[in-house]
Amino acid sequence: MSGETKTNQRELQIHMDGQLARDEWANEINDNTAHLQIQEFIDRCGGNIQKCSRIVLDSDSRRQTVIMPVPYEEEAFRVRNEQIYFITRNGEILKIGGTRTSMRQRFGSYLCGHHVVERGGSGRMSVTNAHVYHTIEQDLLETDSTWEIYTWLLPITTITQNIFGEEVQIIAQTYHAYESCCINLFRSITGSIPFLCNNSDPNY
């Protein structure tokens, strides 16, 4: 057996070993899923939303995880800033989220979705991360779909607060409000929230 064949078998085995996990955690994408192209959303909201990264299968047996980002620009993927991100499948929005860190760090938390008990993990992971992680893996295994991440870097917002008699400039956290407003806009257009979203800040 050639070295290349052995490598291919190991790569295939990585995904075969995850079948029970996908059965439990992957959400089935079907015709009832709300459809909205990212470009239409951009046209509606007017935000400076940019393509950031592809998401592809990771079959390297040297790593545990089975999906990985392939950034279009590494610097943009690493920038630390409040931002809204959109996970798309063939250009259609399936997830809207927000973060105050880099997209690299946020995607790293999605990779923690690997640690479900069905894969021999501790089970100490976000339920949302587990669903997103396994849904993407399953779809990439079964279809030729293109998964991508788009990001919207948010403006820095400061407020002035008097603390002990001193006027202090404080950087406000705003991404949760933007995230909720984006989800509400999506719902106003399609009648439902994005397929892989399950919550938003109720104050907005």
Image (cartoon, rainbow, N blue to C red):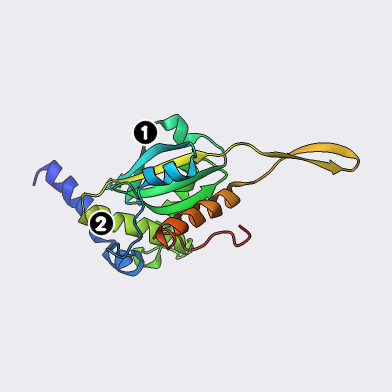
2 vs 1, front mark: 1
Could you tell me residue 199's position as x and y percent?
51, 62
Q: Nearer the viewer, residue 193 or 85?
A: 193
152 up-or-down from 144: above or below = above
Residue 72 - label = 1
What is the distance, in whole Å, between disc 2 and disc 1 at their CAs? Answer: 25 Å
Identify which amino acid the numbered label 2 is placed on: His
Judge from the rendering whether residue 173 lies leftward or rightward of residue 139; answer left or right.
right
Judge from the rendering whether residue 125 lies leftward or rightward of residue 17; answer left or right.
right
Question: Nearer the N terminus, badge 2 or badge 1?
Answer: 2
Could you tell me residue 174's position as x and y percent?
62, 46
Judge from the rendering whether residue 93 lies leftward or rightward of residue 155; answer left or right.
left
Residue 15 - label = 2
Q: What secondary structure is marked by label 1? A: loop
Q: Nearer the viewer, residue 122 or 135?
A: 135
Q: Residue at x 55, y 37 (%)?
A: 80
Would residue 9 be seen by someone viewing this image from the given angle? yes
Identify which amino acid the numbered label 1 is placed on: Tyr
Judge from the rendering whether residue 98 lies leftward or rightward of residue 87; answer left or right.
right
Q: Which residue is situated farthest in the right direction here?
A: 165
Q: What secondary structure is marked by label 2? A: helix
Q: Tags 2 and 1 in contact by the CB under 8 Å rule?
A: no
62 up-or-down from 124: above or below = above
Q: Residue at x 65, y 46 (%)?
A: 173
Q: Nearer the viewer, residue 42 or 119?
A: 42
Would residue 62 be seen by someone viewing this image from the given angle? no
Residue 107 - label = none
Q: Residues within 10 Å of mark 2 (few under 14, many from 20)?
A: some
Could you tell me residue 57's position as x and y percent?
28, 48
